[in-house]
Image (cartoon, rainbow, N blue to C red):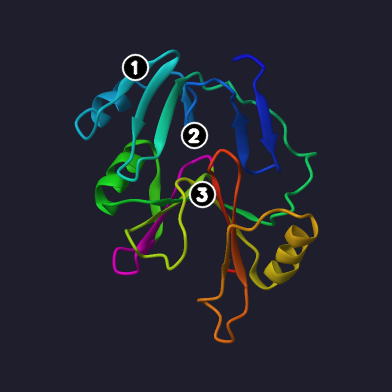
């Protein structure tokens, strides 16, 4: 593996880079030819570090955000990839201490509010590439939370998705019954070895 030929995993929607470097930290990568003006704005809100090939900052939830000075790094065709056993990818979920400051950072990075509110405990944003983020306020989710978490919404198909996950022997981190009046497990959370969370929900 190299910087020019990274190890990537994808289901055609989510794209995950596997980086064995000891200095690698989980986070979110965005690409652009020139981050200069954006970084200038971000420096008024938070600390921005210069790194090899770009810049690094974090949001109020501690999610690391890598701004890479290259807008062609991941120009791949994923149209022939098989869908994930986890179902329908719906974006990233981030739990943050302060939702409004987090929104300021993500909006500066090109994301716009789509739905939700502070009163509801969550706000969803997306950018021009169709990337969706959901910001959750502290203690707004009655289940475990790992930053960042990839979210999959499967509606009425979720029980079948959960069964496939069990049949494959994938360890389940949490079985969630709090949303079900009959106490059934209709949502689950799994976690990969690097700590990423995966919400397999029926929303």
Q: In this view, does 8 lie above or below 151?
A: above
Q: How many marks?
A: 3
Q: Residue 26 carries which label?
A: 2
* Quadrant where the N terminus is found in the figure: top right
Query: Which residue sits at x=52%, y=77%?
Result: 179
Q: Which of marks 1 and 3 is in front?
A: 3
Left or right: 103 as drawn, with respect to 80? left
Q: Is mark 3 on a helix, strand or loop?
A: strand
Find residue 198 and report its horizontal and vertical position in percent: 58, 52
Q: In this view, does 16 lie above or below 196?
A: above
Give the residue at mark 1: 50
Return the residue nearer the eye: 152 or 162.
162
Find residue 125 and report its horizontal and vertical position in percent: 42, 51
Q: Distance between the residues labelled 1 and 3?
A: 26 Å
Camera sees residue 201: no
Q: In this view, does 66 lie above or below 125?
A: above
Give the residue at mark 3: 149
Q: Which mark is residue 189?
A: none
Return the residue nearer the eye: 142 or 158.
142
- The range drawn in magenta is 116-129
Return the residue nearer the eye: 12 or 27.
27
Q: What element carries label 2?
A: loop
Q: Mark 2 or mark 3: name the one nearer the start of the chain.
A: 2
Find residue 83 and report its horizontal and vertical position in percent: 75, 49
Left or right: 2 as drawn, with respect to 142? right
* Quadrant where the C terminus is found in the figure: bottom right
């Amino acid at each position: 593996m190299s910087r020019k030929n990274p190890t990537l995993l994808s289901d055609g929607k989510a794209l995950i880079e596997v980086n064995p470097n000891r200095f690698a930290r989980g986070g979110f990568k965005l690409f652009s030819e020139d981050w200069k003006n954006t970084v200038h704005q971000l420096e008024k809100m938070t600390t921005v570090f210069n790194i090899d090939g770009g810049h690094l900052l974090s949001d109020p939830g501690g999610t690391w955000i890598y701004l890479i000075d290259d807008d062609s790094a991941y120009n791949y065709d994923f149209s022939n990839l098989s869908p994930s056993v986890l179902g329908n990818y719906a974006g990233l979920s981030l739990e943050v201490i302060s939702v409004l400051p987090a929104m300021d950072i993500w909006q500066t990075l090109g994301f716009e509010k789509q739905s939700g509110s502070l009163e509801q405990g969550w706000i969803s944003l997306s950018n021009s590439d169709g990337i969706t983020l959901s910001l959750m306020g502290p203690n707004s989710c009655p289940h475990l939370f790992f930053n960042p978490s990839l979210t999959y919404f499967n509606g009425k198909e979720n029980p079948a998705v959960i069964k496939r996950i069990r049949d494959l022997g994938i360890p389940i981190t949490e079985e969630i019954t709090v949303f079900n009046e009959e106490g059934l497990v209709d949502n689950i959370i799994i976690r990969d070895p690097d700590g990423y969370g995966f919400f397999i929900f029926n929303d």
